[in-house]
Image: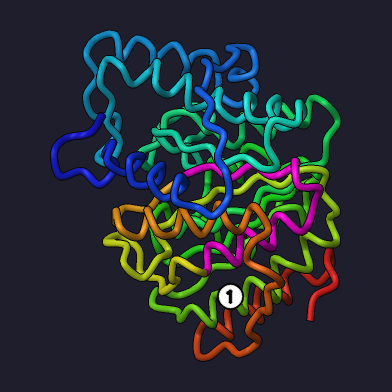
Amino acid sequence: MAPAGHPEQGHRLDAVVEGARGASTSVVELEAPSVDRDLLGEVHSREYIERIEEFCARGGGALDPDTFAVPASFTAALHAAGAGPSAVDALDAGEAEAAFVVVRPPGHHAERSSAMGFCLFNNIAVTAAHLRSRGERVAIVDWDVHHGNGTQNTFYRDPEVLYVSVHEFPFYPGTGWIDEIGTGPGAGATVNVPLPGGASAESYLAAFGRVVVPVVEQFRPDWILVSNGYDAHRLDPLGGMRLESEHYGWLSSWVASQVSASRVIAFLEGGYDLEALRTASTATVDGLAGLEGDVQWPVEMVGSAARVVDLAVGSLSEYWELR
């Protein structure tokens, strides 16, 4: 879908699928159907959907300096957006205990009327909109190294969708500071933890334990959807964070402990080192299966990471009980 040398290539999916198949639990593999167009229209404008379709039909090209499409991209994006709702159906039917949506293009940067950050349609937002239409209360936890601007903006006024992001800042796309907390009835339902580049794994996990864990526990979601980017891994060529593969197992295990086993869906977002993708995917599937045991969050943070988390806690204290 992208030019040679572009980081978002099909080999990424091969590595993730290999890693998932290497987990210590059995994996049921399903094909992703095309998304319902009316559901897609709840997240993206009809004009934008038609524009992407026409752009691809004309041969594709560059949508922005980072985001490319070819003639097959529109169909691929429709199936990527349809994978989450299909996973909901499979979990409802008892076909699996949790779901890992391994598709491309990724989604969390896609805005209502624009593509960006390698994303055409916002896959996780489409699934959240589907669940909201059923009256479900949804938490979206985004640990991609980049802030999920598109997802945040989709639900910025919705008190029944919690959006929580831990990301590198300042970094692409430039959003996700602590003062972005939602608006109107959604005030407090957007939570951003912007960490400095180079923050240690211990600081990252301590920030997660101090902010994300209590907020999600207090929100009491029916479903948890994860923007599961692997670009906070220390090996990633684009990010500047320091997580190890095993830490994705810890994060996934905690998510799976917060709701019933069949109410978790992880969506592949970023991550561009193939070995990190493979090993972290194995850890993710084992974590979703509950094979990682209880997670003990570090408490020590140093330097600017500690200071920014203190600021985040202060900005959120009106809405959540945080210490």
Label 1, residues with CA under 10 Å away: few <14, some 14-19, many ≥20 = many
Task: Tell me the amino acid under the disc marked 1.
Answer: Leu
Q: Quadrant of the C terminus?
A: bottom right
The reply to whether residue 161 is in sight is no
The stretch of residues the image draws in magenta is 247-268
**Secondary structure beneath disc 1?**
helix
Of 138 and 297, nearer the camera is: 297
Q: Quadrant of residue 95?
A: top right
Q: Residue at x 38, y 45 (%)?
A: 18
> Residue 121: x percent and y percent?
48, 28
The reply to whether residue 153 is in sight is yes
Q: Quadrant of residue 99?
A: top right
> Residue 291: x percent and y percent?
64, 61
Residue carrying label 1: 205
Q: Is residue 228 above or below residue 191?
A: above
Residue sitting farthest toward the left: 4
Q: Is residue 268 above or below residue 113?
A: below
Q: Is residue 172 above or below residue 105?
A: below
> Residue 273: x percent and y percent?
29, 57
Of 268 and 74, nearer the camera is: 268
Q: Does the stretch in magenta take in 276?
A: no
Q: Residue at x 29, y 9 (%)?
A: 57
Instruction: Locate residue 139 relative to residue 85 in the image: left or right.
Output: right
Q: Quadrant of residue 205?
A: bottom right
How many numbered marks, from 0 up? 1
Instruction: Locate residue 261 relative to residue 287 in the image: left or right.
Output: right
Instruction: Locate residue 268 relative to residue 26 in the image: left or right.
Output: left
> Residue 81: x percent and y percent?
53, 26
